[in-house]
Image (cartoon, rainbow, N blue to C red):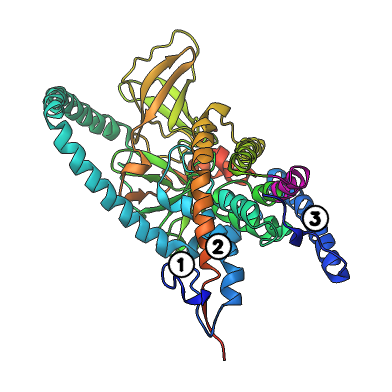
């Protein structure tokens, strides 16, 4: 198809000016975008207020789609259940056997834990939930991993609070608006969670890789003690995440740690729990630093 | 008797005493692009970048299908709106969409003859570079995602672009439906 003649502005002065100024504003857009970008990279996030308002505006539909997603997943699960029933049954029975022994071990550990804590005079901290809500949206088209929460300032959600599902840690609240909040998922490359192996105290950092997996970086160098299948839980250092929240299970080993899969896939859950910051006094000295997210990483 | 033939079968129905609403005709490209920006946030709670940047695809499709309907500076307001929802650092879409509009204009003046394949090739090149530059910008702002992560998204985006083009073409026919009564 040949270009249409209507795109030429012809002899009309008005049309010529219109085209000309269109280009000027187009170039101005590039310049404005570059300046804007520079400000948000170097300085503060000037969009955060507007972003909060925007998310809140889209909230009702986000809530509706959250219900839709859950229903859709249910349908797929039912179909999948019929197809995979036999092999799944066998696997579950096998898992149940191991789980029974694990449960006995866990009970023993729990008892011992209670005894040791009593010995130390530590109060048992089982914080209640700040809010139970849904994830209403996520940055599915970006390389950053953010999700939107269906609760905000009105429900008592505050920046820095950990978000978890019944299966494990999801992320941490980044910024809050009236009735919604933005969550930095643990799979984001900027998220750094202090973790330890569930069975012993091999300490590590869990950093997201941006593709749904997590890189486990061991703190102590030397022989890599990890095995595929090891479960990592939050260690509580940094004071942000309550210790013992499951995070990830080791998949592939690396020289300095491992690649792990997250336990709580945000796509497969319906409800999340916002927990209070575990030990606010531990991060209070670091709160004066310009970037509170780093508080989680400081020992 | 041309206007009597095929009435009802065509999306743009010819009717006596009816005209397209100017508001509808002008707002559909803007609204559909903005909807494309929000839509990926609703589809799935993703652990990896999997959903195509539908807002950018719609913007590209409108500019390719109806050059001049969205003005060349449309990347400025529409990009700003996209930045609110995409999760990218602020200004990323303003910058990249504005450049994309200018580059597309440049390409179209250089190669005025076009068909489906060349349009798709141009769009594919722009989509791939858009996603790569978005990654670079996000990484400059503090992330450290590797390039491998976005390969599936690039492939999916390029493959579904003709579909977006179809949807945009359908919307383009719909926006000129004569719904306003002339008096």
**Mark 3 element type:** helix
Labels 3 & 2 near each other (Cβ < 8 A): no
Chain under disc 2: B
Q: Point out residue A139 in the picture as x, y percentages from the top left corner.
A: 50, 47
Q: Residue furthest bottom?
A: B183
Label drawn at residue B10: 1
Label drawn at residue A28: 3
Tell me which label, 2 or 1, sits earlier in the chain: 1
**Residue plotted at (54% across, 68% down):** B175
| Magenta-drawn segment | B98-113
Q: Which residue is mark 2?
A: B172
Query: Does residue A148 appear in the picture of this structure?
Result: no
Residue A285 placement, left or right of A119: right
Residue A93 placement, left or right of B180: left
Give the distance between the C-alpha atoms of the residues marked 2 and 1, in whole angstroms.
13 Å
Q: Which is the main secondary structure of the residues drawn in magenta?
A: helix
Query: Does residue A85 appear in the picture of this structure?
Result: yes
Q: Is residue A261 magenta?
A: no
């Amino acid at each position: 198809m040949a270009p249409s003649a209507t795109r030429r502005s012809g002899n009309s002065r008005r049309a010529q000016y219109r085209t000309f100024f269109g280009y000027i504003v187009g170039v101005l857009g590039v310049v404005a975008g570059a300046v804007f970008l520079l400000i948000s990279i170097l300085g503060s996030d000037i969009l955060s207020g507007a972003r909060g308002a925007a998310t809140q505006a889209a909230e009702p539909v986000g809530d509706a789609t959250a219900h839709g997603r859950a229903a859709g997943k249910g349908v797929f699960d039912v179909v999948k259940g019929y197809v995979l029933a036999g092999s799944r049954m066998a696997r579950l029975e096998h898992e149940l056997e191991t789980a029974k022994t694990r449960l006995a071990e866990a009970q023993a550990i729990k008892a011992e834990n209670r005894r040791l804590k009593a010995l130390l005079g530590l109060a048992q901290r089982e914080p209640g939930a700040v809010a139970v809500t849904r994830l209403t949206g996520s940055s599915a088209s970006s390389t950053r991993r953010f999700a939107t929460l269906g609760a905000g300032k009105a429900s008592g959600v505050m920046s820095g609070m950990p978000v978890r599902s019944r299966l494990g840690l999801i992320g941490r609240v980044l910024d809050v608006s009236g009735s919604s909040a933005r969550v930095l998922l643990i799979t984001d490359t900027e998220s750094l969670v202090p973790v330890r192996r569930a069975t012993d105290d091999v300490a590590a950092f869990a950093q997201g890789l941006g593709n749904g997996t997590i890189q486990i970086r061991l703190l102590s160098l030397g022989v890599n003690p990890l095995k595929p299948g090891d479960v990592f839980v939050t260690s509580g250092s940094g004071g942000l995440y309550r210790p013992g929240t499951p995070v990830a299970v080791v998949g592939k080993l690396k020289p300095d740690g491992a690649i792990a899969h997250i336990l709580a896939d945000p796509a497969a859950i319906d409800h999340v729990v916002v927990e209070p910051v575990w030990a606010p006094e531990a991060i209070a000295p670091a709160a004066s630093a310009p970037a509170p997210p780093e508080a989680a990483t400081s020992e | 008797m041309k206007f009597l033939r095929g009435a009802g079968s065509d999306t743009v129905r010819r009717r006596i005493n009816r005209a397209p609403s100017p508001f509808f005709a002008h707002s559909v490209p803007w609204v559909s692009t903005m909807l494309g920006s929000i839509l990926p946030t609703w589809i799935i709670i993703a652990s990896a970048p999997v959903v195509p940047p539908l807002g950018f695809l719609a913007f590209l499709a409108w500019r390719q299908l109806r050059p001049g309907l969205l003005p060349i500076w449309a990347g400025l307001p529409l990009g700003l709106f996209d930045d609110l929802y995409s999760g990218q650092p602020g200004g990323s879409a303003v910058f990249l969409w504005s450049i994309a509009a200018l580059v597309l204009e440049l390409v179209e003046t250089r190669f005025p003859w076009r068909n489906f394949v060349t349009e798709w090739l141009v769009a594919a090149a722009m989509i791939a570079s858009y996603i790569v530059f978005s990654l670079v910008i996000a990484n400059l702002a503090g992330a450290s995602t590797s390039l491998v992560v976005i390969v599936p998204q690039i492939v999916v985006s390029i493959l579904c672009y003709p579909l977006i083009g179809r949807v945009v073409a359908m919307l383009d026919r719909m926006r000129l439906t004569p719904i306003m009564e002339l008096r």
